[in-house]
Amino acid sequence: MAAAAECDVVMAETEPELLDDEEAKREAESFKEQGNAYYAKKDYNEAYNYYTKAIDMCPKNASYYGNRAATLMMLGRFREALGDAQQSVRLDDSFVRGHLREGKCHLSLGNAMAARRSFQRALELDHKNAQAQQEFKNANAVIEYEKIAETDFEKRDFRKVVFCMDRALEYAPACHRFKIIKAECLAMLGRHPEAQSVASDILRMDSTNADALYVRGLCLYYEDCIEKAVQFFVQALRMAPDHEKACVACRNAKALKAKKEDGNKAFKEGNYKLAYELYTEALGIDPNNIKTNAKLYCNRGTVNSKLRKLDDAIEDCTNAVKLDDTYIKAYLRRAQCYMDTEQYEEAVRDYEKVYQTEKTKEHKQLLKNAQLELKKSKRKDYYKILGVDKNASEDEIKKAYRKRALMHHPDRHSGASAEVQKEEEKKFKEVGEAFTILSDPKKKTRYDSGQDLDEEGMNMGGLDFPGGPVVGTLRFRCRGHGFDAARCSPPKKTPRFTNNKHCSAQQLRRIVSSQKLLKGYKSGSHGPDLGSGDIFVMALRRAGLERVRRREDTITRRESEGTIGRQCENQQEWLWNVLGEAED
């Protein structure tokens, strides 16, 4: 009886515990169902809360941890989710979904090898599981992308590394390591805003991330903000004293800043040779710092221009624009060097590039000046023909003319071959032509200013005369009227007009006929050229005229009054002399 009583007592003590355990399970299941409802509604925060309550009520249920892991994954909290998933498979190693979620967390965090092991275990439990098969392939793909990226980074093929990291991040969106590698390569490629954005996102989640601090400093360093970059490198080294890349970058940044400042100081002091050496040393510090090196090349080009090493200056400026094709100062410096070396076409191209980028009055004027010099360079260089400087005095031009004329005079080469005689005769004519222009102040001014000498009847290919040069058919100009001089009919009487009136075409025909300038001319060419002010005469010395007889009569003021009449009279006197020589 005593034993029975003891058993009853025992039974009485244990029965309430069993009831409490059952009640806890029912309560946990209730929390789980509520969590599932919120999960279905995509209210993951509430679902997380109820799954946590279920775990608190029944902490040894693998499915509760699995469900909470799934919720945390949806919230992007993969590291916490990984802990729950691992706990679920520890409680139940045959829990396939637990292994899948563990692998998914590993993969999302960038640990593809661990992810592959988890998916492999899931396939061992259920070899037909389609999700496990696909995730296993994804893990292998990430591993392959990592290998390719590592090889390409060593080859400095940063574009391909960025591509591989983008593909890997599609499967591992929470992997900071992949993001850092991508950001570093973007910085190397000069895509600084993108790199900064990636680094800043990481720093918002983890302000002590040394890699992100390093990348942030690297972007500033490559943007030529060296002082700020050093601050980030120092901060990264505080978080991780053994961070090798941050240490090297910090050292390079300080050295580059010091060399550049020393070079600038030497330049300002006029010590161009020392400045050249310092800029050259700075260029050897870090070839990856494109923006700073572009400035260093331009600075060294400026030094070379001061030393009159213009070809070297052009080469340095070219290297600068290769590194930074938006660097206006380098284009301007190179254009000036091109101007100094008389490479006007190249100068025009550079000034056009500058003006397209920055449409300022100053740049427009520089472009116009270069275009003018280009236009002038395509004409005969009379200064070069005479062998004098553009600032030569009148006496220097005369001396040079005499010297060159004697040098190329046909009589001096009478015993030479026909080809040599022809060449020397051509040069002799060019010397005379050059002297004709440069010895006349007005013509010289127009020539120096780049104006077309033909515009004022100053063609350099023929003979000069009071109203204009010999260029072609005998013709007349007047305001608004033109006519065929070869078909003029004799006037009944000589018209009279003053300089304040414009003659009509009919009046002009009568004047020309009365002056008898075209007897014997039968070419029938039409020579009117409209729009000029005063009447003037132009004729070709030999070609185009069949026969023109020399006449002794002249136009008198009685036949044509005013300034125009005097001009025509002078022209006629000159014309008869020329045509008389041609006829003889």
Image: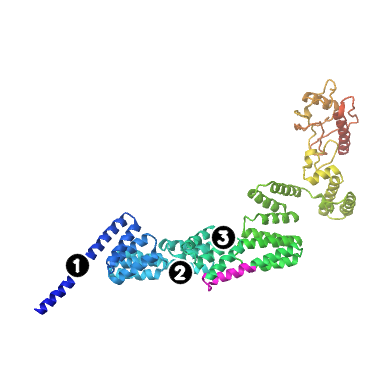
For label 1, the residue is: 19
Which is in the foreground here, disc 2 or disc 3? 3
Residue 315 visible, this angle: no
For label 2, the residue is: 147
Q: Residues within 10 Å of mark 3 (few under 14, many from 20)?
A: some
Q: Quadrant of residue 283?
A: bottom right
The answer to whether residue 452 is left or right of residue 64 is: right
Residue 579: x and y, percent?
86, 36
Q: Which mark, by number, is residue 190?
A: 3
Q: 506 or 367: nearer the eye?
A: 367
Which is in the foreground here, disc 1 or disc 2? 1
Tell whether label 2 touches label 1 (CB within 8 Å): no
Q: Is residue 249 magenta?
A: yes
Q: Earlier in the sequence, mark 1 or mark 3?
A: 1
The answer to whether residue 99 is left or right of residue 554 is: left
Number of marks drawn: 3
Helix, strand or loop at disc 2? helix
| Extreme-left residue of the structure | 1
Tell whether label 3 touches label 2 (CB within 8 Å): no
Q: Amino acid at mark 3?
A: Gly
Q: Amino acid at mark 1?
A: Leu
